[in-house]
Amino acid sequence: MEIDRIPITQLPSRYGIARSNLYTRLKDLGIEPEKMGKKAFVNAEQLRLLDALHEHIQKGGTTGEFLKSINGARSLSNQTLAASPNEQNLVFQPHALVAVVEAIVKRLLPNTGNRLSYLRELEEAYERGWLLSTSEVADLLRLSPKTIAAYGQEFSDAGFVFTRVGTRKGGEIAWSIDKQSSFGALPPQLDIGVKEAFSADFDPEPK
């Protein structure tokens, strides 16, 4: 069942971003939430546009690139309408714009051919001490930002430990990366013989 409208209060957790970052995205996209009583909502078409923008950002794109793709799609639709002046009943629907934008976004997304490349990227982020945003962590682990945000203060995956350490400039949660401790490691062995090991007179500690 398609969502008719959704409260904007649910959107920060949907995308794993701060409210201030959400308001910036709404402003950039020119979305005016519909107010009903004390609550504000976005409709299904506006939600699809926000989802498409978030997916684009997740894959390393920028809001500016996304807005250019939207303007290009709108320009194309206007040219189509101008070329058919006799079609008085032809109306450009918002969902058509979103579909065009989503197709453009998919073309912009980089292909990840190597299945283990994300481990190398995590290793590099760990070695360099980089702080990754929720969307960047979600992209590397192939999870949704909502899932990452729901993990709480700390979680581990693929041998790495991810800890919340603040907020990135764009408003998303920042995560530090550490290595998971190795469990079950054997203690260092002393280079001694069996007879010495069982002798009460043998003391491995220097006096």
Image (cartoon, rainbow, N blue to C red):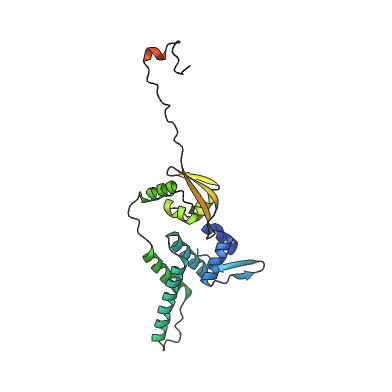
Q: Is residue 64 above or below residue 148?
A: below
Q: Is residue 5 visible?
A: no
- Please tell me which residue is depicted at 55% across the width and 66% down the height of the picture: 24
Q: Is residue 144 above or below residue 205?
A: below
Residue sticking out furthest to the front: 207
State left or right for residue 165 relative to residue 75: right
Residue 114 image point, x, y percent: 33, 52
Residue 202 image point, x, y percent: 43, 13
Q: How many marks?
A: 0
Q: Nearer the viewer, residue 194 or 114?
A: 194
Classify residue 42 by image quadrant: bottom right
- Please tell me which residue is depicted at 51% across the width and 55% down the height of the picture: 146
Residue sticking out furthest to the left: 113
Residue 126 image point, x, y percent: 44, 47
- Please tell me which residue is depicted at 51% across the width and 66% down the height of the picture: 47
Q: Is residue 21 visible?
A: yes
Q: Nearer the viewer, residue 192 or 145?
A: 192
Residue sticking out furthest to the bottom: 86
Residue 120 image point, x, y percent: 37, 48
Q: Is residue 176 above or below residue 135?
A: above
Classify residue 77 by image quadrant: bottom left
Q: Is residue 195 above or below residue 11?
A: above
